[in-house]
Image (cartoon, rainbow, N blue to C red):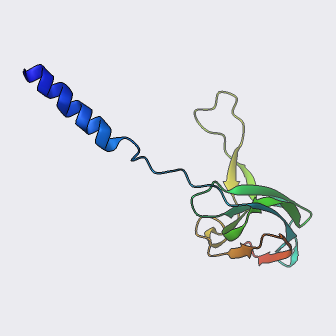
Amino acid sequence: MRLFGLFVFMGIIVALTAGCTPAVPKPPPIAMVKGKVQLNGKPMPNGEIEFEVIAQPAKSLKIEDGVFSGEVFVGKNTVRIHVYKEGPPSSTDPEKKPSKMESLPAQYNTKSALSTDVPEGGASDLNWDVTSK
């Protein structure tokens, strides 16, 4: 009888929790963006720019000769700008390849307050001026 009661209890638990998993939200649409990044008043030679909307992975675009373009999510995006320089190799890397070190201040990347609203039609006039100090 105890075994029967246990099975009934487990059946009730399964019935009550079935379908309680929240639906995965549909990602926002994607739009084309392009723009320019100036570093110390000159076109940034190379780097990366990230666009991130809430609850979605960041979209990373290459910056070459101060210009970037690519597809990002529509909506309010936090923007992060990166310029990397070679750092010392990791002590755990058997090949002793140089590591990547951020060379811009945190205000442009890890602590970025930069943002932009990307409309459904995209944007072709996104411009940022950053300094290395």
Q: Is residue 95 among what the camera can see?
A: yes
Quadrant of the image occupied by residue 62: bottom right
Which residue is depicted at the point 57% across and 58% down? 55
Q: Is residue 69 above or below residue 125?
A: above
In the image, residue 25 lies at what x, y percent?
57, 55
In the image, residue 106 lies at what x, y percent?
62, 68
The answer to whether 25 appears left or right of 81 in the picture is: left
Which residue is depicted at the point 79% across and 78% down? 129
Residue 80 or residue 97, whichever sits in front? 80
Which residue is depicted at the point 83% across and 69% down? 122
Q: Is residue 48 among what the camera can see?
A: no
- The quarter in which the C terminus is drawn is bottom right
Quadrant of the image occupied by residue 47: bottom right
In the image, residue 114 lies at what x, y percent?
67, 75
Q: Is residue 116 above or below residue 103?
A: below
Quadrant of the image occupied by residue 111: bottom right
Q: Is residue 96 above or below residue 68?
A: above
In the image, residue 66 lies at what x, y percent?
89, 67
